[in-house]
Image (tube, helix red, strand yellow):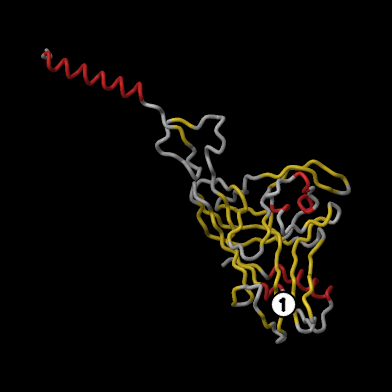
Amino acid sequence: MLSKASKYCVFVFLGLCLIFVSCYEPIKGCQDVLAVNYSVTADETCDEDVTDCCRYPNLFLTISQKVGEELFSEDSIYLNALNQEYCLPRAIFFISDVSLESEDGEISYINDKISGNSLLAGNLESVSTKDDVVLVRKPLINFDIGEFVQPEKNFTKLRFSVGLDDTLNHFDISSLDESHVFQSSDSLFVSLEDGFIQAQFTIGNKMMMDTSSYTFVGDDVIRHFEFDVDTMATRGVNFYLPLQVDYEQWLWGVNFELDSKEDIINKMKANTMNSFSIN
């Protein structure tokens, strides 16, 4: 049988417990283990009216731009295989349609979508497609492809395209937010009918006496790539994949003294598939 002192201690303890329970406010936070801001201490998920409770990782391409063995600089002078000096003050191009294939053959894409109208076969049609377009240009290195939510998984293949497919190439950009890559200051949009300039290079050479611009336009300029990779995605963490582009390869075989502008563009188009690698 409890003494009076013992009973008093029990009552005090129970009273303190009741006070603690009545004063305790549940911790609200992100309870999705795949999120960047997953909270191990959260008791409840965020209220429905709280936006961006859970933030998810993004997929990035870390692109090294080179000219042969040198890092690419817009201010440098380079020497081609014909001992012709040239400079490359501007080199920009689109990358799109990025996907990763895992060991089990499952293909993963980013989650972001773009919706609007696109001119397809002469008709303006309502479309919704992946919004994974980036415009590769200096001085950027890491290019944000978009939200990429995956459990821990090993990927064995990387696929992407240099250029834009028909839907994106003829997308009506008038409804897009100003922050979208299609609305950027480097926007290469020409018209709904002609689409975008999908790659643009400004090249200078003594034979030219000045710089000239070389542009890739049309639905036939897109090139599709597939590379073997061996990389692990960690849940809740941004995912970076290394890629290299070599402008020496892109300009391989170009003769600035003898080639016409059309010749140079055609050679560069033919060289595109040899200009990228996994570093």
Q: Secondary structure at mark 1?
A: loop
Q: In which quadrant of the rendered view does residue 273 lie?
A: bottom right
* Name of the residue lying farthest toward the bottom: 83
Residue at 62% x, 73% y: name it.
72
Side of 41 where 196 appears, left or right: right
Q: Nearer the viewer, residue 263 or 7?
A: 7
Q: Nearer the viewer, residue 180 or 232?
A: 180
* Residue 145, position as x, y percentages in the image: 62, 53
Q: Nearer the viewer, residue 5 or 273?
A: 5
Q: Quadrant of the C terminus?
A: bottom right
| Above-or-below relation of 190 to 24 | below
Residue type at mark 1?
Trp
Q: In which quadrant of the rendered view does residue 111 lie?
A: top right
Residue at 67% x, 49% y: name it.
179
Q: Which residue, given by chain and number where applicable, does mark 1 sit on?
A: 252
Residue at 80% x, 84% y: name it.
257
Q: Quadrant of the N terminus?
A: top left
Side of 248 where 215 appears, left or right: right
